[in-house]
Image: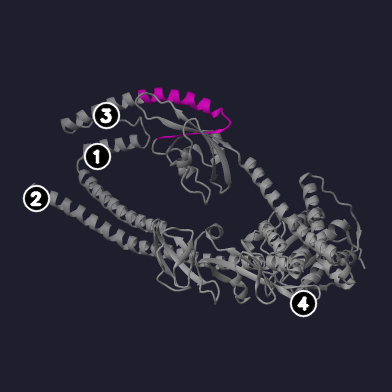
Amino acid sequence: MKHSWLSPSFSAQLILALVVLILLTTFSAGIPAYLLTRSALEQQAWSQVEGGRRATRSLLAAEEERLASLVALFAERPTLQRLVLEDAATELDSYLDAFRAQSELDLLLVCDATGGALAGDLGPQTCAEPPEQRFLLLDGRPAMVAGDEIIDAGGERLGSARGAIWLDEPFLSLMELRTGLAQSILGPGGERLVSTVSGLDTPAGSAAERYELQAAAGPYYATSFPLDAGSGLLVEVALPVAGLARSESSALLIMVSSTAAVAILGSLVGVLIVRQLVSPLQQLTGVAERIGAGDLVAPIPLVAGPAEVRTLAAALQRSQASMLDALRERSEALDWRDTLIQSIVEGVVTVDSRGCITFMSQGAEALSGWTREEAIGRPLDTVFPLDAGDGGSFRAQAPRPGEKRQIAVRTRQGRKAVFAVTGAELASPAGEETQLALVLRDVTQEEAVRNLRSYFLANISHEFLTPLSTLNASMELLLDQAENLSAAEMRELLKPTYLSLRGLQTLIDNLLESSSIEAGQFTLRRQPVDLNAILAQALQLVEPLLERRQQLVSVVQPGSLPAIHGDPARLTQVLVNLLANASKYSPPHKTIDVRVEQLGDALRISVADQGPGIPEAERANAFSSFVRGEAADSEQVGIGLGLYVVKTTVDAHGGRVGIDDRPGGGAIVWFELPVQEGKEGT
C-alpha cells in the first residue's frame, strides 16, 4: 500500500501518452490527405475551366458558320438581287425586315458595288470594314458579323450583304447554359462589355492565361481567348469556385474534428482501463453494454461490493423490469401499426426530426433496394439519394404534410427513379416527438413516356424543317429563274432537292419501321437474296449523298457469295442506313470502305467510315432508339433511329451486329447473317 500514491500519476501519464500518440498518428495521415484533396479539387476545377474554354470556341465557330450560311442564303436570293439592281430602297427595307424576322438575325445591311449603304440597320460604316472581319464593336456593343457578295445570274457583282447578331447577355446566357461556365466579352482595353455575372472585377491576366476573379457571389477561376486577330475582343469563361473553398474548409474542419474526437476517445479508453480495477463496476458495465446492444433480458447480478454498488444493482433490476413492461406494450402497438402499413401497396417511410428513418414498409423496400433492417436508423438522404445533377437533398425536397411532390432519386442498384411523394404528420404518443410520414409511389415510367414524347416531337420537327427549307429555297429559285437556267444548271439545282426528298424518305422509312417494331408488327418476307443486287441498289440510293460530299465507296468482296435467305427490302434498308451514317460521320473527300466476307457459317458485311469514331462506353446504347452521335457536319443529323432499325432487322434474320474501331480513326459497323448451307450465290 505504500506505493498506492503512484497509481493516479501512472494513470494520468498513460492516458496522456495515449492521447499524444493518437494525435501524432491522426495528423500524420490527415494533413497529407487534406493537401492531396485540396490539390485534386483545384486541378479538377481548372480542367473544367479549360473544357469550358474549348466548348465555347466550338460553339462560337458553329454560330459563325450558321451566320455565314444565313448571309450567303440571303445574298443568293433572286428577290434581293432584283431589288438591288432596281435600287428600290423602300421595298429593300421591307424585304430586309422580313428576312431578319424569319432568320433571327439582329442586324442586316445591303451595300452597293461602290461600298455605299443601300438599306439596313447595321451602320453604313460597316460597308467599309474588311470582309474577313468577323467581330466588331458597333456603338460600343460587341457583334458577330458575316458578309457575302451579291452576284446576279450573269456573274456581275451587284454589291454585298452583311448580317450580324449581338453578342449580348441573352446570347452569353445561352452559351453559359451549354457550357456550364459564366461568359463575358472583354473590350480591347480589358474592360468588361457584357457578362452573365454581375460584379466581376477586371482580369489581371491576358488572353489564354489562368487567373482568379472576385464577384459578389464569390471567387471564380477564369481564362480568356481572343475572338479574332483584328477586333481586339476577348471571350472570358469563368467557373464559380465558392463551393471549392467551402469543400476545403469542410475538409480541414473534418480533419480537426476527427482528431479531437479520436483524442477524446483515447482518453475514455484510458479511463476505462483504470476503472477495470473495480470488479463490481466492471460486472455492471458489462451487463449495461449487453442491454445497450439489444439483450434487454440480460441478468443483472447482485454484486458483493460496496453498499452503493449493491443499491445500484438493485435499482438497475427494477428499471429493467419496468422497461420490459413498457416495451411489451409498445411492441403490441407497433405490431398493429406495421400490419396496417404493410398492407398498403405504395412505400411508406417515417422520419424523425433528425432526418433518420424509423420505419420502412415492404413497398418502400422494393422501391429503394434497402431492407428494413439496413435502412432503419440511417439518414433519409442515404437511403434515397437524389439523382446526380439535382441540388439539395431528399429531406430538403420532401413535401410538407398535406403536399405532394415528384422527386428524382437513385436506387441502391443505381437505377434512376422518379417518386411521387406525399407527406403526412404522424401522430405520436404523448411525450414523443412528432414524425413525418412519407408515402412513395414510383412514377418513373410515366415520366419517361412524357419525356420521350417531347423529345420525339422536337427532333421530328427539326428533321422535317431542314429538308423542307432546302426544297422551298430550290423551288423559289426555279420559279424565278426557270427561263434563264440551262439543263445542266437545273440538274445542279435539283440535286439538293433530290437529297432532301431522299432524306425525308429515309426518315419516314425508319419512322415506319420503328412504329411497326414498337407495335409488335415487324415481320419479314423471306426469299433467296442476291447480296450483290442488294448492295448495288443501296449504293445507288445513297449515290447523291456521296456525290454531294464528294466521297467514294470502296467495296471488297469474294468472287462468289453464299446464299442468304431473307427480306430483300429490309436488308436494302439496313445497308442504306449504314452507308448514310458512314457518309454523315466521314469528312468530305474521304473513302467509305465496304467489306463482305464469310466467317464460318455467317456472312459479315462491314461499313467503315473515317469519322470521329464511337467511344467504347457509348457502344452499348448506339443501337437504341433516339440515340444520336455528333456528326462531322452539323447539317448531317438524324433522330437516332437508323441503327435501331438495323439491329432489329438483323436480329429478326437471326444475325448479330457490332461496332469496332477502324485503324487510323473512325468506326466500323458490321452485321452478320447466317448463310444457307450447301448453296452459293453469284
Q: Is residue 385 above or below residue 584?
A: above
| Mark 2: amino acid | His
Q: Is residue 588 magenta?
A: no
Left or right of 316, for residue 556: right
Q: Name the residue carrying label 2.
A: 3
* SS label for mark 3: helix
Q: CA distance from mark 4 to mark 3?
A: 109 Å
Q: Quadrant of residue 153?
A: bottom right
Q: Earlier in the sequence, mark 2 or mark 3?
A: 2
The magenta segment: 325-352
Question: Which residue occupies 64% across, 46% down?
Answer: 451
Relative image position of residue 137 (x, y in whole percent): 53, 69
Q: Earlier in the sequence, mark 4 or mark 3?
A: 4
Relative image position of residue 456 (x, y in whole percent): 70, 49
| Mark 3: amino acid | Leu
Q: Quadrant of residue 675?
A: bottom right
Q: Name the residue carrying label 4.
A: 156
Question: Which residue occupies 13% across, 52% down?
Answer: 9
Magenta stretch secondary structure, dominant: helix
Q: Nearer the viewer, mark 3 or mark 1?
A: 3
Mark 1 nearby-residue class (10 Å; few <14, some 14–19, many ≥20): some
Which one is nearer the viewer's eye here, 532 or 29?
Answer: 532
